[in-house]
């Protein structure tokens, strides 16, 4: 029996809950291992991980605890990623100010007077019940050059590409006739980005009402290090949610009155988080460059946001479920080892 093989097995078996089962499995696996093996194989490793994580939940005959643990894992990852993203934005580069802002406006709208009307120094702010990302915005009056919308946007695209920007989308913002579908004017917009900023640009012109002008908004692009840390923390948060569910399940396994109470509170809290999680899917569009990052993906968790009204009751319900598990000391099973759920297949 090789000591080199015993070490990886014993490390791997830490995925199982504490108890005599760890030692029994280690002895069984070492005796069954073929001569010359120095580490567990990939299939065997995956099987041990799967069975060990299932054993963490206890209740070997219950499928409901597995479903609950899966949802707890998903939402734990979501909450962890949201917290990491919000904290990380504090260290992200700020929006351009002073001469840099003036130079940017001159590149975007050369020769036109920019009327700055919006500025935010904080990463995010509440705007009429909506959690908005920081931005700098300005507008200009229409000129004969801006009235030729197609030509003006073509020139803008050339200037952007020459300055290292990438145009990600162009689209019409003109209202259409309900019956014919015809555009009522020639208003158009584009979005573009570079490594630090995201641009939303609209050239509005309505010849019938002699109205028009340019509307420009500039947002911060999410730095790559922030994207990477957000995803990494989210992935780490998923097994943490599973382990938390397993800890509570095993702690309450022989408490018949406390188990339904904690389960009901946990399920209620997770259900209330579903709208916030669905809202967060916009993050995928932002990362792909097909959406303007005008709001954070975790806005549904902000209680003051119009979509975050369920954040308080969701947090209260999940806290109540954890409190029930904390306040109820575990009662050992009368005849079986609680770590016996889920046996490795060799």
Image (cartoon, rainbow, N blue to C red):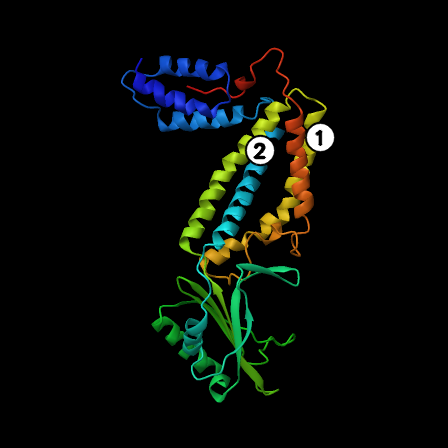
Q: Position of residue 169 (x, y in %)?
A: 46, 67
Residue at point 52%, 41% (across, down): 77
**Towards the viewer: 239 or 101:** 101
On residue 218, which mark appears?
Answer: none
- Dot 2, how many residues are within 10 Å of its Cα: few (below 14), some (14-19), or many (20+)? many
Dot 1: what SS? helix
SS of the residue under disc 2: helix
Report the disc number at residue 261: 1
- Per the model, the C-alpha gap separating discs 2 and 1 is 16 Å
Residue for badge 2: 69
Q: Return the residue nearer the eye: 38 or 64.
A: 38
Identify the residue at image location x=41%, y=71%: 100
Residue 204 lies, in percent from the top left, at: 54, 79
Against 32, residue 46 (above or below) is below
Q: Is residue 302 visible?
A: yes
**Is residue 67 toward the left or the right of residue 168 in the image?**
right
Mark 1: give few (<14), some (14-19) or many (20+) Cα within 10 Å. some
Q: Is residue 218 above or below residue 59?
A: below
Residue shown at the point (67%, 24%) measured from the top left: 328
* Residue drawn at 59 percent across, 54 percent down: 299
Q: Of residues 43 and 21, which is closer to you in this image?
A: 21
Q: How many marks?
A: 2
Residue lying furthest left:
36
Picture layout, residue 131 above or below residue 346: below
Q: Is residue 155 left or right of residue 72?
A: left
Residue 52, given in percent of the width and then of the height, sits at 48, 25
Q: Quadrant of the C terminus?
A: top left
Mark 2 or mark 1: name the one nearer the start of the chain.
2
């Amino acid at each position: 029996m090789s000591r080199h093989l015993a070490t990886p097995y014993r490390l791997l078996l830490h995925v199982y809950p504490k108890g005599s089962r760890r030692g029994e499995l280690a002895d069984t696996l070492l005796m069954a291992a073929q001569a010359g093996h120095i580490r567990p194989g990939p299939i065997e490793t995956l099987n041990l991980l799967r069975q060990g994580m299932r054993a963490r939940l206890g209740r070997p005959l219950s499928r409901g605890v597995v479903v609950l643990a899966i949802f707890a894992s998903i939402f734990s990852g979501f909450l962890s990623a949201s917290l990491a993203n919000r904290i990380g934005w504090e260290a992200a580069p700020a929006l351009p100010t002073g001469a840099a802002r003036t130079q940017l406006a001159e590149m975007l709208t050369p020769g036109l007077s920019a009327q700055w009307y919006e500025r935010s120094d904080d990463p995010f702010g509440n705007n009429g019940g909506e959690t908005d990302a920081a931005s700098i915005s300005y507008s200009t009056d229409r000129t004969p050059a801006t009235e030729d919308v197609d030509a003006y946007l073509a020139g803008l695209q050339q200037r952007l590409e020459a300055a290292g920007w990438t145009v990600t989308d162009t689209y019409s913002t003109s209202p259409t006739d309900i019956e014919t579908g015809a555009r009522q004017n020639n208003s158009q917009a584009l979005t573009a980005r570079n490594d630090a900023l995201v641009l939303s640009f609209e050239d509005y012109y309505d010849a019938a009402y002699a109205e028009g002008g340019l509307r420009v908004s500039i947002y911060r692009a999410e730095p790559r290090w922030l994207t990477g840390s957000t995803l990494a923390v989210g992935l780490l948060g998923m097994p943490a949610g599973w382990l938390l569910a397993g800890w509570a399940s095993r702690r309450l396994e022989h408490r018949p009155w406390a188990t339904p109470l904690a389960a009901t509170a946990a399920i209620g809290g997770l259900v209330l988080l579903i709208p916030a999680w669905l809202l967060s899917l916009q993050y995928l569009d932002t990362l792909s460059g097909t959406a303007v990052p005008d709001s954070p993906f975790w806005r549904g968790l902000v209680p003051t946001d119009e979509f975050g009204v369920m954040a308080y009751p969701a947090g209260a319900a999940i806290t109540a479920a954890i409190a029930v598990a904390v306040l109820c000391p575990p009662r050992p099973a009368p005849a079986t080892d609680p770590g016996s759920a889920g046996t490795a297949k060799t």
